[in-house]
Amino acid sequence: MASRAVSPALMAVTTRRAIIDRRALADGLDTTLAALPDYTSRRAALTATLIEALALGSAEITRRLHENPAKGLELAGARAFLIDQLIRIAFDAITTRLYPASNRTSAERIALIAVGGYGRGQMAPFSDIDLLFLTPWKRTGWGEQIIETMLYLLWDLGLKVGHATRSIDELIRFVREDVSTRTAFLEARFVWGDQPLYEEAVARFRREVVSGTARAFITAKLAERDTRHQRMGDSRYLVEPNLKEGKGALRDLHTLGWIGRYVHDAENVSALVDKGLLTAAEARQFRRAESFLWAVRINLHDIAGRAEERLTFDVQPELARRLGYADRAGLAAVERFMRHYFLMVRTVGDLTGLFLAQLEEQTSRLAWLPGLTRKPGRLNGFTLRRGQIGVPSDDFFRAEPSRLIEMFALAAREALPIHPQAMRQAARDSVLIDDRVRRDKAANGWFLEILCNRQEPDKVLRLLNEAGVFGRFIPDFGRIVARMQYDMYHHYTVDEHSIRAIGLIARIADGTLRAEHKLTHALLQQLASRRVLHVAVLLHDIAKGRGGDHSELGADIAMKLCPRLGLTAAETETVAWLVRHHLLMSRTAFKRDLADFKTILDFAEAVASPERLRLLLILTVVDIRAVGPGVWNAWKGQLLRELYEAAEEVLRRGHKQKGRAERIAERQTALAQAMGWSPDAASRHARRFTDSYWIAETPDVLAANAALIAEAEAAGKPLAIATRPDPDSGTTLVTIHAADHPGLFYRIAGAISLAGANILDARIHTTRDGQAVDNFTIADPLGQPFSEAQQLARLERIIHDVLTGRIRLADRLAARPLARRRAEVFQVQPYVIFDNLASNRYTVVEVGAADRPALLYALTRALFDGKATIHSAHIATWGERATDTFYLTDLTGQKIIDTARLAALEKRLLTAAGVTLKRSVAAPVPERAAAE
């Protein structure tokens, strides 16, 4: 490992004396210190001088940052250059003016060595300074004085210093035992002090530690990289990526540098070219990616005012503005910036594969044997190199461009990886794909084979995408490559989301996810055409970002593309229908009352066939699950399963529901048996409720309600509250039995919010003798059930205290500290939609708004104030957006159809949706109004 004092990043810094003129500053300081009488005054003068120099230098770097924010490498080097000069001035002043030693022994030598990122000469505004104090043998008193004074001085400057003091022997022992320490020293750079001491340490490090350990080091660093990727989400395409530790980010570039330096003592990226690990063109890509990522990181630190590595939604727009991105047709500036980011990290991934492949060629014991390349007949001219598909010549794809598709089909069919050199050629030659190739029957057949492969199709599709072949062969797909969706719901770019959804089909079908998706797994075995499903999943979001309804636009694309891929007319029609209606099932399940039979009839009428219903359920499941971690939950699965089963019954039997009276009688009989009631007791209980209650609730909820009512009446309790966690759905059922009175719903909603829970569903029932039986399905903010005994007790206590007037609800909600939420960065325009056709009995109102604590309370309070009666509520959240749907009647139990009345309700709801709670005294509640 050659010694170095100047890194490539430091070499990139221009007009250095404008940052700090070390010689002039040192000369002036020496004169000042020489004139001062004692240690204390000299120490104070030194500190003041360096504080001023640091402030001036930092101001100059900040000026350059704001003037040229995209010069990442120069800005990274500028900070390291400034720190270097300050350390050199400090060391000279301390050793000559504070603790001078006229006759130093051979032990009184110190080398100041930068390690880690500081050793690379790359620093962001809030990066740590990693400094090694190297001594020849054991520490002397003079040496300890120098090191201690240096550290206190740097801390007085407000710098974050990571430091260690080692003799050469200690250093060698530490780096031999610990790979992380070894990696840090691998980037060691001489800063100041005794350079021969540094040179000796470097020579011993190379001779005693590095020699013969290259393979072990490579293995350790790649394992470390894989673990880091898993921790960061294992995708380059997260919409809030970590630009230091994420996949394809700066740490991956560092890993390449570490390995190249360890194996070949490669000082910089140019040396990697000299060693044959990268081509000159790839080295330029490396530098561009590195400079871009550093520019983003430095600007991110500056915006955040701290060491921040995650590109969160709130900083992305400002980063886009600083780096010069502007709105363009169909893409906002922030989306253009993030697309550039994703393309850059993809480049890093490509470079990593090529680099490691070349390294394997060089370090393999068999690398010199040319006979390893062979051409099995089944590979149709492709080669097999160490178990990886390769190409026999540089012009292989140019001779027949359709081979670009065939290679990936072979990879899918044979379950073989593709050699990075072949990926490099595919990426280079992807421009050869033209309309002739797109119309080629064999090429389309190969593509469909890749898409419908049952063994991890997403892996090969991802390779196809990263080589640039996917977007060239399917140009409409190319338009969504690296396209982010600037919201808190989607975790991945559009292309990555679609590819993940296709992979989920295979994982559900092969049984990997069978336990979580039993119905979906069973339905996959019943499909008439699996390729219809795979193509529909591929295309369901393909028209995102085009300015219109992406479902309709995507259906148009499907009608043109499917015949090209070889689908029949009937298959094409089904794919187009699925793309057009891919949101129908989720919207119905999550926004509508599934106990209202008209909901089921309307949905079944739209679907029209059992095969479409099966396809739509599977598409809906993988679409939701591929959005990101934590988006899918058992509650959503339960709602989709209920909708599927109800619609499947309608489609199987025709538009004829099992007799309503018959279903009610069956449930009443089953409940009586479960409760052990006599016929008279069962009849009395049945007469208390209207027919809608028996239809809306499941048998287990009916039994839970009956038990609560019986217990309350036996104890003479006017108010009874019960909670029941349900691990299968990941929710908790909360039941309130109380005398019915106006405003009961909004008070309960407020109480549940005050307890820290979210309401997912609510069904409100009033008995014929004036009692309310309300069932709320709730979860915690992380989508988990309330299940701890203390949690449940607190929830019940708060509901009880609110309903009995012990808590002034509006005051308590307004007084809650609402920390700044990430969602506030998004502008969500509230809307209200009334629908008097969705239900035969109720007016359905859908309210969309920015999600926030106690939103449901505000909306239900607005409906109460507007004299509307709520019969059920269904709540869905999509990141920063909430959609709350209510089934309403007026006070007489009729639909609300008067235009003026609807307009007044709309105004109240929009006001509630668009404002935050303010501290106020709750308005008095009238003594009695209609049942809610």
Image (cartoon, grey):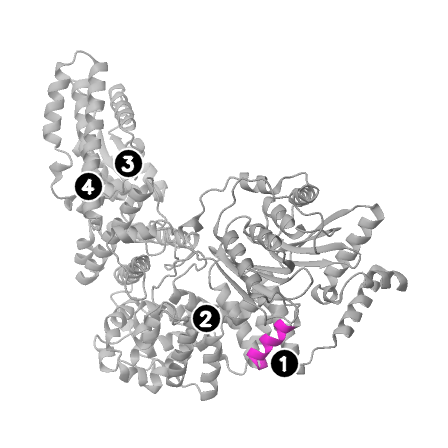
Q: Which mark is residue 502?
A: 2
Please rate how many residues cluster around mark 4, counting C-alpha atoms within 10 Å: few if below 14, some from 14 to 19, many from 20.
Answer: few
Q: Earlier in the sequence, mark 4 or mark 3?
A: 4
- Residue at (48%, 57%) from the top-left corner? 629
Question: Nearer the observer, disc 2 or disc 3?
Answer: 2
Q: Earlier in the sequence, mark 4 or mark 1?
A: 4
Task: Say which of 567 and 572 sits in front.
Answer: 572
**Image quadrant for the N terminus?**
top left
**Residue 236 coordinates in the image, percent (x, y):** 36, 59
**Residue 500 coordinates in the image, percent (x, y):** 44, 66
**Residue 39 coordinates in the image, percent (x, y):** 22, 14
Task: Say which of 847 and 727 sits in front.
Answer: 847
Q: Earlier in the sequence, mark 1 or mark 3?
A: 3
- Badge 1 marks a residue whose secondary structure is helix
Q: What amino acid is labelled 4 in the image?
A: Arg
Q: Which mark is residue 651?
A: 1
Q: Earlier in the sequence, mark 4 or mark 2?
A: 4
Q: Which residues are magenta?
A: 598-610
Q: Earlier in the sequence, mark 2 or mark 3?
A: 3
Q: What amino acid is labelled 3 in the image?
A: Ile
- Badge 4 marks a residue whose secondary structure is helix
Residue 843 appears in the rendering: yes
